[in-house]
Image: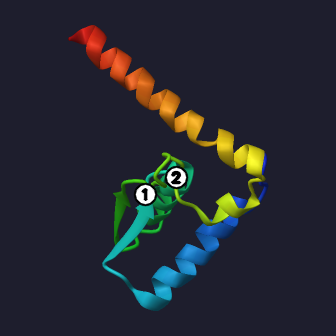
């Protein structure tokens, strides 16, 4: 993901470091859907010994399964209609696996 958005995670790390230093929170909450961002923040907290607990929270979804995100506004009508298929397919795969293990 970093290659498609060069410098993005460096920016995330910089902004979060500044915010953590100014606010001094005891806990920070990040959505599970942003797994790479969660990993960057976890490493940042560890590497710089920042006294904060990172809590990864479940992804909140639209009724059709699409993860809620401010970035969804960039999807055109066709993309928006197709986007939930990814999550629905993953859920179908999980269900098939569970049933096969029965």
Q: How far across and down, in percent of the image, does residue 5 sit? A: 77, 54
Q: How many marks?
A: 2
Horizontally, is 2 left or right of 50 in the view? right
Image height of 95 relative to 36, above or below: above
The numbered dot on residue 81 is none
The residue closer to the viewer here, 98 or 84, is 84
Whichever of labels 2 and 1 marks the residue nearer the N terminus, that label is 1
| Residue 75 percent across, percent down from the top left | 74, 54
33 w.r.t. 101: above or below? below
Indicate whether 69 appears above or below 83. below
Q: On the rendered image, what quadrant is the C terminus found in?
A: top left
Residue 15 located left or right of residue 26: right
Asked whether the residues under the numbered discs 2 and 1 touch, taking CB atoms below 8 Å apart as contact, a structural biologist would say: yes
Residue at image coords 54%, 56%? 40
For mark 1, what is the residue?
Answer: 60
| Way the structure is coloured | rainbow
Does dot 2 land on a helix, a strand or a loop?
A: loop
Q: Secondary structure at mark 1?
A: loop
Q: Residue at x 55, y 56 (%)?
A: 37
Placement of 86 over or under 99, stated as above or below? below
How far is disc 2 from disc 1 in space, using C-alphas?
6 Å
Quadrant location, the N terminus: top right
Q: Residue at x 54, y 76 (%)?
A: 17
x, y percent for residue 100: 29, 9
Q: Nearer the viewer, residue 34 or 27?
A: 34
Quarter of the image for residue 42 reads bottom left
Q: Residue furthest left?
A: 102
- Mark 2: few/some/many CA within 10 Å (<14, 14-19, 20+): some
Q: Camera-side residue: 50 or 73? A: 73
Look at mark 2 in the image and give the residue it sits on. 67
């Amino acid at each position: 993901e970093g290659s498609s958005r060069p410098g993005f995670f460096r920016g995330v790390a910089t902004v979060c470091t500044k915010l953590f230093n100014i606010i001094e929170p005891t806990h920070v909450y990040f959505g599970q859907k942003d797994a790479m961002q969660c990993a960057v923040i976890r490493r940042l907290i560890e590497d710089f010994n920042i006294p904060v607990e990172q809590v990864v929270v479940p992804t909140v979804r639209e009724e059709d399964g699409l993860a809620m995100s401010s970035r969804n506004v960039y999807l055109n009508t066709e993309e928006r209609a197709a986007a939930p298929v990814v999550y629905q397919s993953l859920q179908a795969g999980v269900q098939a696996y569970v049933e096969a293990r029965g």
